[in-house]
Image (spheres, grey):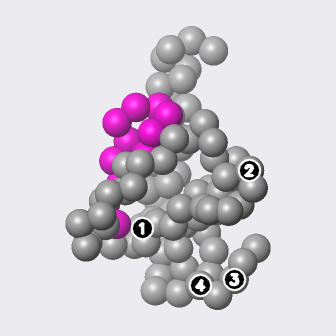
Amino acid sequence: MSDSGNTKGMRNMENAILEMQRNLDEEHFIAFVSADENPYCVVMKSDELNFPDNKTVVIHRNGGMTTIINLNFIIEVCIRRFGQYA
């Protein structure tokens, strides 16, 4: 895949994740799931997301905490309900 193809694919993923976040309610969150599912990273509606490159998501939380996710280790991005494991 060419660089322009990689960029387009990343924009599609970025847009999909941002759309998922916009549609969240107080009972749901976005889970970035790794191969072993332990741990996975949670994104809330109130979090600020940045995508500095095609392999990284930076999550800024209201309390000041920042989490950096390497997308190479993520096998699934999905919406989950609080209290739901799978």
- Quarter location, residue 30: bottom right
What range of the chain is rendered magenta? 47-57
- In this view, 55 is above or below 20: above
Q: Main secondary structure of the magenta part?
A: strand
Question: Which residue was labeled with disc 1?
Answer: 22
Distance between the alpha carbons at the discs numbered 1 and 2? 26 Å
- In this view, 4 is above or below 38: above
Query: Contact (CB < 8 A) between labels 3 and 1?
Result: no
Q: Is residue 54 magenta?
A: yes
Give, as a three-letter code, the residue at label 1.
Arg
In this rendering, would 67 be left or right of 5?
left
Mark 1 or 4, nearer chain start: 1
Q: Position of residue 28 (x, y in %)?
A: 54, 80
Q: Is residue 39 magenta?
A: no
Mark 3 or 2, nearer chain start: 2
Distance between the alpha carbons at the discs numbered 3 and 2? 18 Å
Q: Position of residue 72 (x, y in %)?
A: 60, 36
Q: Residue at x 40, y 31 (%)?
A: 53
Give, as a three-letter code, the residue at label 4.
Phe
Give, as a three-letter code, the residue at label 3.
Gln
Q: Residues within 10 Å of mark 3 (few under 14, many from 20)?
A: few
Q: Position of residue 60 (x, y in %)?
A: 30, 59
Which SS class for mark 2? loop
Distance between the alpha carbons at the discs numbered 3 and 1? 20 Å
Residue 48's label in the rendered image is none
Question: Which residue was labeled with disc 4?
Answer: 82
> Foreground: 65 or 8?
65
Give, as a three-letter code, the residue at label 2.
Ala
Q: Position of residue 42 (x, y in %)?
A: 51, 67
Residue 35's label in the rendered image is 2
Q: Residue at x 34, y 36 (%)?
A: 52
Residue 84's label in the rendered image is 3
